[in-house]
Amino acid sequence: MASENSSADWFAAWFDSPFYHKLYAHRDEDEADRFIQILIKKLKLVPGSRVLDLACGAGRHARVMHSLKMDVTAIDLSVNSIRRARALSPEAIRFEVADMRTFSLHNDYDAIFNLFTSFGYFERVEENEKVLDSVVRHLSERGLFVMDYLNAHKVMRDLVPEEQVEREGVNFHIRRECRDGFVLKHITFTGDKGVQQFTERVQLFSVQELERMLKTAGLKVLHTYGDYELNSFIKHESPRLILITQLQ
């Protein structure tokens, strides 16, 4: 069996794989649309506001932001994701290949969005802290940062250990486990190189740990929500952990 992402930067190979896009092709565009509309209204962002979609994937959230008259920049480490995003999106959205730990853009932003659990990918906490430092460097005065993260408490309680899913004629065997403070998702399938395996790894930060990291970076938590309708966060029940913060 070929192991495709044994390195610490597991996401670099997996997110650039065409099989990543096959597995997650079912992601809900309508849900993304509703969520972004609710968020933009909640944040009171006006047309023309400069916004950054950090770790944008194929750009589904960025496209909604653009439809709401935001001035949108979006970055992702994956060359294939950015290529796909550009093909699917209006030319007015600026898509760039960049690492969220070290990105350097010429603008500052009224709001930066980090959505759909695009945080906690790295082996060392310090690497995640670099992401927040980069965010702070790119926020305008009193700029807003929104993190849409998993609810670690619920993930650990309700973990589905194993499942089989079929996408576009490919059968994916998925095995999940919590180990050493991470949730691991082992994905095995037969592709063009034979049997391949990728492992997604996300750190299980509690709400208190994230709040401490955000505060250290210079961000004040304004609101904490538990789902895409922005209902209150309930520790062991909410499907998501959504933090709205502001540059202090």
Image (tube, rainbow, N blue to C red):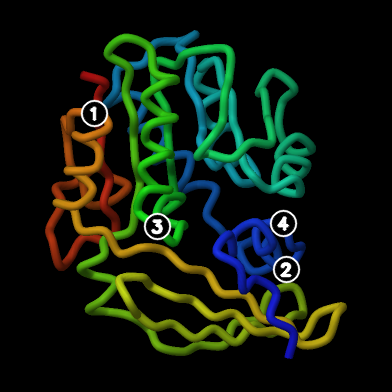
Q: Which mark is residue 16?
A: 4
Residue 122 point in image, percent of width and height? 46, 57
Cα distance, mark 1 to mark 3? 21 Å
Residue 110 point in image, percent of width and height? 39, 15
Instruction: Give the side of residue 86 with respect to residue 75, left or right.
Output: right
In the image as oriented, which residue stretches furthest toward the right?
192
Does label 1 or label 3 sit earlier along the sequence?
3
Q: Which is more toward the observer, 15 or 223?
A: 15
Q: Nearer the viewer, mark 2 or mark 1?
A: 1
Q: Which mark is residue 60?
A: none
Cα distance, mark 2 to mark 1? 36 Å
* Residue at numbered disc 3: 124
Instruction: Check disc 1: other Cα within 10 Å, few if <14, some if 14-19, many if 20+.
Output: many
Q: With respect to residue 172, does 91 lie above or below?
A: above
Cα distance, mark 3 to mark 2? 27 Å
Instruction: Check disc 4: other Cα within 10 Å, few if <14, some if 14-19, many if 20+.
Output: some
Q: Which is more toward the observer, 213 or 37?
A: 213
Q: Nearer the viewer, mark 2 or mark 4?
A: 4
Does label 3 or label 2 sit earlier along the sequence?
2
Instruction: Check disc 3: other Cα within 10 Å, few if <14, some if 14-19, many if 20+.
Output: few
Q: With respect to residue 123, does 36 lie above or below?
A: above
Q: Which mark is residue 19?
A: 2
Does label 1 or label 4 sit earlier along the sequence?
4
SS at mark 3 in the image? loop
* Residue at numbered disc 1: 219
